[in-house]
Image (tube, helix red, strand yellow):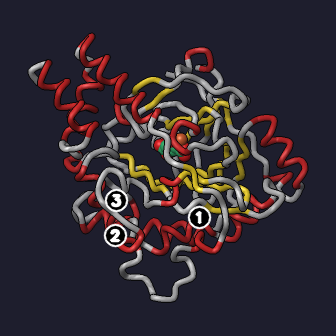
Amino acid sequence: MRNFIELKQSNSIISDKNRLKERMDEEGYLFFKGVLNKESILSLRKDICDILQLNGWLEKDTESMAGIANIDKRCTEGELTYIKVYHQIYKLRSFHNSGHWAELTKILSNLFEHGVFPIPQKILRIWFPKFTQHTTPFHQDFVHFQSDKQYTSWIPLGDCDIALGGLGVIPYTHREKNNHTFSLGAGNLKVDIDKYKDSIYSTDYQTGDLLLFHVNTIHGALPNKTTNKLRLSLDNRFQQKGYDVAEHLLEPHLFDQAPFKWDDVYSDWDEDDDLKYYWKKDSFKVLNRERKYIELALNDAINLANSEKNEDALLFLSRVKELDPESEDGQKAIKTLDHLNI
Ligand SMILES: O=C(O)CCC(=O)C(=O)O
Ligand SMILES: [Fe+2]
């Protein structure tokens, strides 16, 4: 069992722009207790839980807000059954609006001289209990988001204590880029954190808490060790207005795992809703998506499968195969599994 150090609260300097910037530059994260509007969070939680309930992901005859999981439905990112439900939730306006909450962008505006740009790709995490091998591994986000100049807001949708598995960060790690290798869990890439194992900061998060961290701060999730509760959280990203943005961050999350476009997201929204395509008003350079980290995870998994029939790698490859057997990655996965007679 790892020991966790309590996150340092920055509430007392919340209006002091210089000190906030200094602390973020120095430590790579800022944590604020109870600064977000609880009603907005709980109302979003309700919208999400109602969809989960309709899809049978919650135990029958339980109050949806309690988030009591039907563990027969366990699944995760990278699986079509997950994406099918996830993309239903992705149509919620209340979900997209969570990246634009006034109290959130106000705090973030302290970190940017020339205005806050909320990245269009918003992310919700739904983490099942009794599924701990799929916990998000410790990693740095540059491998996924192709930027050195972003901050992420991690927000639990409801109370999230250590047992439910909130986010852990390792302060002072954002100045160095580390090598990543294959892992199960969101993003499929991990950093070896052996030397930091006693330096993980986390907390019993409560509704309204806000964690901000630098894109290169090493972070990961703690396992959901409850027997029956889903962990729900948001991770959204912000940059200074006008900075370059990688093209995939202008698409809905998991658009590359099942076809899904903004027009699908917006299908039930009011025609003249300002939040639709809001980023088209801004000017910034769009960067081509680099494939190197996607390839790193896949090739590493193939090597692990070939050399030691590594079970995590085999599970990952079977998911890649199922997701899109015709694609180049799907073909590589099929070839490896066939060769191993799996
Ligand atoms: O919530 C999680 O499990 C993963 C979050 C994460 O990696 C992030 O916010 O960048
Ligand atoms: Fe991350």
Name the residue at 59% across, 69% down: 279
Q: Looking at the picture, tell me which residue is in the foreground, 324 or 318.
A: 324
Among the two numbered marks 2 and 3 on one chain, the one whose residue lies closer to the N terminus? 2
C-alpha separation, residue under disc 1 versus residue under disc 2: 21 Å
Q: Position of residue 207 (x, y in %)?
A: 58, 58
Q: Position of residue 107 (x, y in %)?
A: 76, 60
Among the two numbered marks 1 and 3 on one chain, the one whose residue lies closer to the N terminus? 3
Q: Which residue is mark 2?
A: 50
Name the residue at 73% across, 45% down: 30
Is disc 3 placed on a helix, strand or loop?
Answer: helix
Q: Could you tell me if the residues under marks 1 and 3 are in contact, i.e. CB atoms within 8 Å?
A: no
Q: Residue furthest left?
A: 341
Is disc 1 placed on a helix, strand or loop?
Answer: helix
C-alpha separation, residue under disc 2 versus residue under disc 3: 13 Å
Q: Position of residue 18 (x, y in %)?
A: 90, 50
Ligand 1 closer than 8 Å to the CB at disc 2?
no
Of the residues tagged 2 and 3, which is closer to the observer?
Answer: 3
Q: Looking at the picture, tell me which residue is in the foreground, 99 or 197.
A: 99
Q: Looking at the picture, tell me which residue is in the foreground, 155 or 310.
A: 310
Q: Say if residue 135 shows up in the picture.
A: no
The residue type indicated by label 3 comes to: Tyr
Q: Position of residue 218 (x, y in %)?
A: 61, 32
Q: Is residue 249 left or right of residue 150?
A: left
Q: Which residue is mark 1?
A: 99
Name the residue at 24% across, 30% down: 332
Task: Find residue 136 and report its image quarter.
Answer: top left
Q: Quadrant of the C terminus?
A: top left
* Picture layout, residue 273 above or below residue 35: below
The residue type indicated by label 2 comes to: Asp
Q: Which residue is mark 3?
A: 86
Of the residues tagged 1 and 2, which is closer to the observer?
Answer: 1
The residue type indicated by label 1 comes to: Gly
